[in-house]
Image: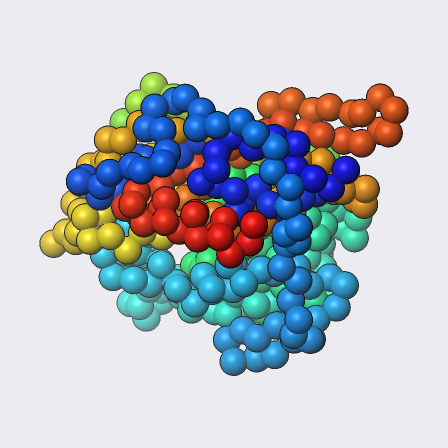
Amino acid sequence: MDRVLAARSQSLRGILMAASWNFMRVVHYSKSVLSQGAQIRGITSDLGHACSRTITSSFVAKTPTSNTVELLGKAHPRDDYSNVTDKILSKVGKNLHNQRYHPLWLIKERIKDHFYKQYIGRFGTPLFSVYDDLSPVVTVEQNFDRLLIPKDHPSRRKGENYYMNHTHMLRAHTSAHQWDLMHSGLDAFLVVGDVYRRDTIDSSHYPIFHQMEGVRLFSNHELFSNIKDGENLQLFEQGHRTAHKQETHTMEAVRLMEFNLKQVLTKLVTHLFGDGLEIRWVDCYFPFTHPSFEMEINFQGEWMEVLGCGVMEQQLVNSAGAEEKIGWAFGLGLERLAMILYDIPDIRLFWSEDERFLKQFSVPHIDQKVHFQPLSKYPPLINDISFWLPSEKYSENDFYDLVRTIGGDLVEKVALIDEFTHPKYKCWLKNYNRNIGIAIPVRSVVHLLQCHVSNIG
C-alpha cells in the first residue's frame, strides 16, 4: 500500500517519492522565466509523456528535528499544531511590497498616494496612517478571536493555515492587526503585508500573497456633521439585527457608512483602472463586518471580484476601546490587482529575481502604464504520477506543501482528476492533474530534478 503505483516522468522522481499520497498529472509549463537558448535533455518538449512505470520509494516527508521554530529572531516551541515548512519560512521577511519598483510595491504606492491626496486631516496631514512592516507572526487570538471568528469556523483549521504552535501562527490576513491599531487610538489606517494560507497549486494561487487592509472610524459628529438636522441623529440604538444592519446601529448611521465606504472604494478603483469603469456590489458574509459586500468590476468584458468590505461589527470596535464610534473596513489583494493591471499571467512571477521581469516595472512614475512582456515561449510537458493515500487523516494541502517543498516554484498547478477505492482493501488512490511551470533555465531544472532522484531514490 505504501509503494508508488505509476510514475510518468523519471525526471520528477524526487517529487513522486512521497509513498503515501496521490495520483498526479504533471505539466512543465514554461510561461515563467526561461533561458531562451536552453536545451531540454531527457524530457520530452511537447505534451506527450516521458514514460510510465512503477517506482518503489522509501522517501518520507522531512520531519523537523528541532524543538523550536526559529523566525525573525524569536524561537517558538513546537507542538502538535506546528506545521509551517522550511520553504514557507524562507519566504518570510522578503517583503515584496516594500521592494522598490516591484509590481506589488507599485500597486501599494499608487493606493497609498491616492489616500494621502484624497483624505486630509484637520492639520493638513494625511488622514490615513500606513503600516507596511508589521510582523507576520501573530497570535491565534489576533488572527481569529478578536475578529469574532467562531471556534469551529473552517478558516481556523490546520489544513488552511501555517501554525508556529497552538498559540502563534503566520497571519492569514492583515485584519489580524485591526484590533491592536484601533486599541492604540487610531481612527483611520491602512495595513499592508504578506499573508500566509495553505492553498491549492495553480497559476493564481500561492501560499504567500499580499493584502492591504483599510479601516475608518467615525464619531457621531464626524458622520452627521454635513447632514441636514444631523445634530438630531444618533449612531446607536437598541434594536434588532436584520439583513441590512446590526442590532446596535441606527439605519441612518448604516446608510451613511455604506455610502461613504462605497464612495471611497469607487474612487480608489477608478484611480487604478481609469474612468468609465463599470462596478457592481454583491452582498456577502464576513464574520467581522455586517452588512458586508464584495466589489466586482467589469474589466475587458469580464466581471472580476477585487475586494471585500463592510461595516465593522460593533462588538469588535467596542472591545478595542472605541465604544463611541462606528467603523468600516475593507481588504484587497495586491497580487490580484497587479495581475489584472499589468497583465501578469502567473502569480509565481512575483517571486522572480530575473532582471528581465523586474526591469519592466522600473518606471519613472508609479502611475505609468505597464504591460508585462512574457519571457518564454516553451511549450508544456505532461507527466503522470500515482500513489496510495495513507491510512491516517488526509489533507490535500499537506500534499501541496510537499510538492512546493521539493518542486518549489516550478510547480504551476495541481488538480484532482480521478480517484479510486480498492474494492477489497478499501485503500484510496486519487488521480491529480498537476502543472509544473519552469522558473529557471531548463538545463538547471533537469539537473535539479535528477539530483532529487539521486539523493532520495
Residue 424 vs residue 189: left or right? right
Q: Position of residue 74 (x, y in %)?
A: 57, 79
Identify the residue shown where x is 27% and y is 27%: 276
Identify the residue shown where x is 60% and y is 67%: 138
Q: Nearer the viewer, residue 222 or 53?
A: 53
Q: Quadrant of the N terminus?
A: top right
Q: Nearer the viewer, residue 216 or 63?
A: 63
Q: Position of residue 158 (x, y in %)?
A: 70, 53
Name the image colouring: rainbow
Identify the residue shown where x is 30% and y is 42%: 442
Compared with 320, 23 (above or below) is above
Residue 226 in sight in this render: no
Residue 296 vs residue 290: left or right? left
Tally of marks:
0
The quadrant holding residue 137 is bottom right
| Residue furthest right in the image | 424
| Residue furthest top in the image | 301
Identify the residue shown where x is 36% and y is 52%: 351
The quadrant holding residue 65 is bottom right
Residue 18 vs residue 307: left or right? right
Q: Nearer the viewer, residue 294 or 408?
A: 408
Residue 410 in sight in this render: yes
Q: Position of residue 149 (x, y in %)?
A: 71, 51
Q: Position of residue 135 (x, y in %)?
A: 50, 70
